[in-house]
């Protein structure tokens, strides 16, 4: 019998992840404007120290909803690992507030690559390791477009989504869409944590999920960090209900990334990459209801 010359498909070696979810909210007693005592929910912020091959790397402040994906996405967006297959396992233990990452072959020059940090404008003081702009010139975003109708669908999907923000406030939410379809929604105390968690989730989808037809949504402002991380994930369109910083705008224009802000109800502004947005201005006008015909 003649054997096929094509090798069998190789299943990516995905890392082993624990499922160490922690409570997302905490009940506290407050006094309201009437002098009454009542119980309210607040976000349960907690530290998570990341150890890579037993070497302490960084401590993140997080809700702890999906800590393993947060750690994986953090390593990806910091450009410390090139492939999901570089990671053997991620073990989170909330008793000691630690995440132990075991790599397959170590991280080359980790001391040198993590020596310099840039403190970003992310909530909770996000930080990226040195060379924030080094890779921007090497990013080539895929062609993709979004219709105005799809944009409104995204905004509405976020509006009706049950969330920690609605019950406790004080958190940021990020989401990944394919058209109007919500693929994943993540909340955390910082938007940089939320986008890192989404990056980790994308890597765990059979090793890699292409971002070419995806849209990234965030409740927070579009800073340079958020724009760069979205571009590193291969996602060429970002939407925010907030605004955009000057550096975020400059990077988005350099990349040809479509950045849409102030997106609430039927209002929005497109800061850059308007050629990726297929406008349907007639949808922005609320049409009055047509009265029923009288017999």
Image: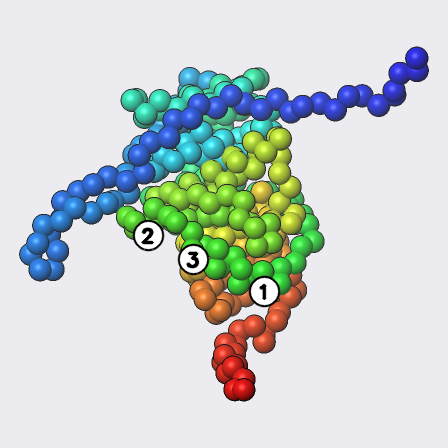
Crowdedness near tag 1: few (<14), some (14–19) or many (≥20) residues, C-alpha within 10 Å:
some
Instruction: Give percent across and percent down for residue 165.
Output: 34, 50
Residue 269 visible from this viewpoint: yes
For disc 2, the marked residue is: 166
Q: Residue at x 33, y 52 (%)?
A: 166
Tell me if 78 is positioned left or right of 8 in this view. left
In front: 121, or 287?
A: 287
Q: Is residue 231 above or below residue 67?
A: below
Q: CA distance from mark 1 to mark 2?
A: 25 Å
CB within 8 Å, label 1 to label 3: no
Element marked by disc 1 = helix
Instruction: Give percent across and percent down for residue 230.
Output: 55, 47
Image quadrant containing the C terminus: bottom right
Crowdedness near tag 3: few (<14), some (14–19) or many (≥20) residues, C-alpha within 10 Å:
few
For disc 3, the marked residue is: 159
Q: Is residue 267 above or below residue 70?
A: below
Instruction: Give percent across and percent down for residue 30.
Output: 13, 48
Q: CA distance from mark 3 to mark 2?
A: 10 Å
């Amino acid at each position: 019998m003649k054997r096929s010359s094509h090798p069998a498909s190789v299943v990516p070696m995905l890392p082993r992840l624990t499922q160490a979810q922690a409570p997302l909210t905490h009940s506290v007693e407050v006094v309201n404007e009437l002098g009454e005592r009542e119980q309210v929910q607040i976000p349960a912020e907690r530290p998570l120290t990341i150890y890579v091959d037993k070497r302490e790397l960084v401590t993140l402040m997080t809700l702890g909803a999906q800590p393993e994906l947060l750690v994986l996405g953090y390593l990806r967006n910091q450009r410390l690992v090139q492939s999901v297959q570089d990671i053997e396992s991620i073990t989170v233990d909330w008793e000691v507030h630690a995440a132990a990452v075991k790599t397959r072959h170590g991280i080359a020059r980790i001391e040198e690559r993590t020596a310099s940090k840039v403190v970003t404008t992310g909530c909770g003081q996000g930080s990226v390791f040195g060379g924030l702009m080094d890779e921007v010139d090497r990013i080539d975003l895929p062609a993709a477009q979004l219709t105005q109708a799809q944009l409104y669908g995204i905004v509405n999907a976020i509006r009706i989504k049950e969330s920690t923000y609605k019950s406790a406030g004080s958190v940021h939410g990020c989401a990944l869409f394919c058209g109007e379809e919500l693929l994943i929604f993540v909340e955390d105390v910082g938007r940089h944590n939320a986008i890192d968690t989404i990056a980790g989730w994308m890597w765990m989808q059979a090793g890699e999920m292409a971002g070419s037809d995806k849209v990234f949504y965030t409740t927070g402002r579009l800073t340079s960090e958020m724009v760069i991380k979205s571009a590193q994930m291969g996602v060429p369109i970002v939407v925010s209900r907030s605004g955009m910083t000057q550096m975020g705008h400059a990077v988005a224009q350099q990349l040809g990334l479509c950045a849409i802000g102030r997106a609430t109800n039927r209002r929005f502004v497109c800061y850059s990459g308007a050629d990726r947005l297929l406008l349907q201005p007639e949808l922005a006008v609320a049409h009055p209801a047509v009265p029923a015909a009288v017999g």
